[in-house]
Amino acid sequence: MARIEPYRDVLAGVFRKSFPDKATPNTRRNTQITTPRLTQNPISSHPTFSNGKTKMPIWVDADACPVPVKEILCRAAERWKITTTFIANHVIRLPPSPFIKARQVMQGFDVADNEIVEQLSQGDLVITQDIPLAADAIEKGADVFNPRGVAFTRENIRQRLAMRNFMEEMRNAGQVTGGPSEFSQSDRKHFADQLDRWLQKNTRPSG
């Protein structure tokens, strides 16, 4: 895969051109999304702990989720007794558990992504490597990070979208080939650590 450094100045220009003030063009959906912001969603009916703290569920974009990440999420769901839902357009094999759910949606462009956005509530956690989905989830007030444990936030999502769109244009022009690096043990550990920090902050383990 071509290195990004040679395109650093070009990327800066693309970012300024793509996101001058308020609107962020979303080329994948051909729609305009506003600057990600927290919204005042109604209080959800999520289950609570005995101390009254809400159990915020986890939503997983499972179509391209690495197997090690699925295993980490399933173990965490059992330990923390937190509902974790894997959404994909194909059959997903998961261990039996009242806290682990699989939802298969119809084949189609963005069907799984739209299902996640429709179902999530403010404060939920979304696991995805899809940048436009991450932007939509952030706009609804969700926490988001990818299978490598990299957090998407209101502060960095516009730049992530700009880079994604730029690299897509470069690939379409044949100037960049290949894809991301292989999922590594370091990625696995980084994701597990990030998930543990989120769980420590938002829930408490059973027992």
Image (cartoon, grey):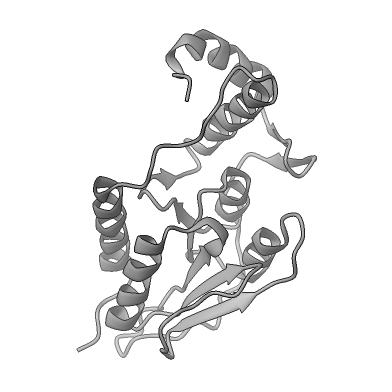
Is residue 43 among the parts visible in the rendering? Answer: yes
Q: Quadrant of residue 102?
A: bottom right
Estimate the x, y position of residue 82 in percent, counting from the top left: 39, 79
Which of the two residues, 75 or 203, is positioned nearer the viewer here? 75
Residue 7 position (above or below residue 145): above
Figure check: 156 above or below 66: above
Residue in the image at 63% along x and 51% along y: 136
Nearest the viewer among 40 and 170 is: 170
Side of 109 relative to 204 (left or right)? right
Q: Residue furthest left?
A: 207
Examine the rendered structure and indicate whether residue 11 appears above or below residue 19.
above
Residue 109 at x, y percent in the picture: 75, 55
The extreme right residue here reads 30
Position of residue 202 measured from the top left corner of the image (x, y, whole percent): 34, 68
Asked if residue 51 lies left or right of residue 137, the reply is left
Q: Residue at x 66, y 63 (%)?
A: 112
Number of numbered discs: 0
Give left or right: position of 162 versus 109.
left
Q: x%, y% of residue 85?
A: 51, 75
Residue in view at x 53 percent, y 64 percent:
62
Tell me which corner region of the image, top left, top right, bottom left or bottom right, holds residue 13. Answer: top right
| Horizontal side of residue 106 vs 40, given as left or right | right
Is any part of residue 20 visible from this angle? no
Q: Between residues 29 and 139, which one lies in front from this camera angle?
A: 29
If the image is split into quadrants, where does the C terminus sit?
A: bottom left
Give above or below for 73 relative to 156: below
